[in-house]
Image: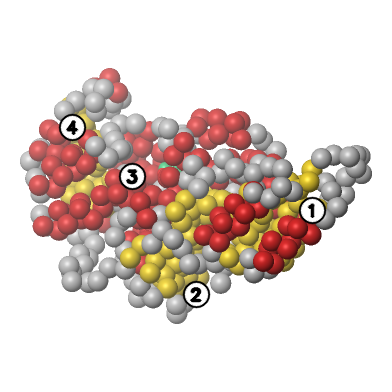
Amino acid sequence: MKALKIGVCGVGNVGGAVIENLTSSPQIVESNGGVKIEITQVGARKGKSAVPFDLDVTTNLLEVAQNPNIDVLVELIGGCDLAKDLIEESIKNGKNIVTANKALISTHGDELFDLAKKNGVQIGFEASVAGGTPVIKALREGLVANKVKWFAGILNGTTNYILSKMTDENSSFEDALKQAQELGLAEADPTMDVDGTDAAQKASILSALAFNTPFDFKSVAYGGIESVTPDDILYADQLGYSIKHIAYGSIEGEEVNVSAYPTFVSKDQLLSQVGQQMNALEIFCEDIGSTVYYGPGAGPKPTASAVIADLVDISNGGWPVLEDDIKKNTLCKEGKKTFSRYFKLDVKNEAGAIAKVSSLFAHENISIEALVQKESKQNSDIPSVPVVIISGPISDTNAFQMSGNLDSMEEITNSVKQFRIHNAL
Ligand code: HSE
């Protein structure tokens, strides 16, 4: 049987799960993948006490990168500083790389792939997006014969868990986040989950594969779920939607737009049914239409599963390396793509206020598809009332502009909120 000698750097939740899997049940990978994976060395900054396995441990991670007996360095330390140095040093020493590091790939991917190509080695990054759900493999192998038109994905398990708990169990945001952290889903700093950074990094990686763009996280527009309130969830439900954090990418000509925002998804769409910490990705291709990938996207075991799948692929020769002269498409932050919108306003409870709001929509040439204002039976003297407007399709730029215009109206008493409505067309 083939043998692959690996060095594992980083023994947190994911590193621990990789080592546990490979040491406790090696026969699964041996019989399914036809390769014997041997952990030659472990790099752990905290030393041997952090590694509850009988393995060669060093606190000097660069020693792993330079170890001549290692074929593949598995980078699981995260971040962009030491991880980048470690990967570069490993590549220069002729080692293949497997990483779960979406921050690094989404920011420095092009540079690292160039270096890997020059040194004749491969980089596997299945674990960087959607954990145990093989979406990278789907894009670079299964769908290779297709032109992808758009993708829409729930790519962050923590926020999906929070939104699901808030929707299904009326949990508070804080309680749901705490539970997600206890399950090991969240990033070390959960701000990156909550504010949309994590999903946006993953979306930029998908864009590179789906649309042949550079790895260019800074050109992805995104926002987080902090602004979603129980009221929004209730309105969404009554109007026939779930609220999901959706990463959306599409191509028009050579221009690609990728973004990640809390989004209304109609309950008749598959993505609206994706609950708990699960991830899902719908990829729409020109000739075959939609394919959908669903599964666990966060947590130690799903991520370890993706890391090990990459190791098996590398033992089989890895992936095709593209020629340098293939022209890349451009990732643009300002999207022309239009979406219908949910606007939530607090409007002064006085005659003519709604008429002024609707005339602003008319003035901006934005159609109103639905307007919800509930009669207050208790107290007709309350100073303002919540009003929800579902608009026709408009671009992000127009939606932000419209929110700003509404905010500056005397009749609006609170900051206006707007969310996209996903339209799978
Ligand atoms: N914190 C991420 C999530 C998992 O919640 O999806 C790793 O990407």
Q: Name the amino acid, label 3.
A: Ala
Q: Nearer the viewer, residue 34 or 149?
A: 149
Q: In terms of sequence position, does the residue under pointer 2 or pointer 3 come before the other?
A: 3
Q: In terms of sequence position, does the residue under pointer 2 or pointer 1 come before the other?
A: 2
Find the distance from the CA under tag 4 to the CA under tag 3: 19 Å
**Residue positioned 18% across, 32% down in the render:** 61
Q: In terms of sequence position, does the residue under pointer 4 or pointer 2 come before the other?
A: 4
- Write down the residue under mark 1: 353
Query: Which quarter of the picture shows residue 358?
Result: bottom right
Q: Name the amino acid, label 1.
A: Ala
Find the distance from the CA under tag 1 to the CA under tag 4: 64 Å
- Write down the residue under mark 4: 61
Disc 3 residue lies near ligand 1 with CB under 8 A: no
Q: Which of label 3 and label 1 is nearer to you? A: 1
Q: Name the amino acid, label 4.
A: Leu
Q: In terms of sequence position, does the residue under pointer 4 or pointer 3 come before the other?
A: 4
Find the distance from the CA under tag 2 to the CA under tag 3: 30 Å
Query: Which quarter of the picture shows residue 227?
Result: top right
Indicate the secondary structure of the residue bearing disc 4: helix
Find the distance from the CA under tag 2 to the CA under tag 1: 45 Å
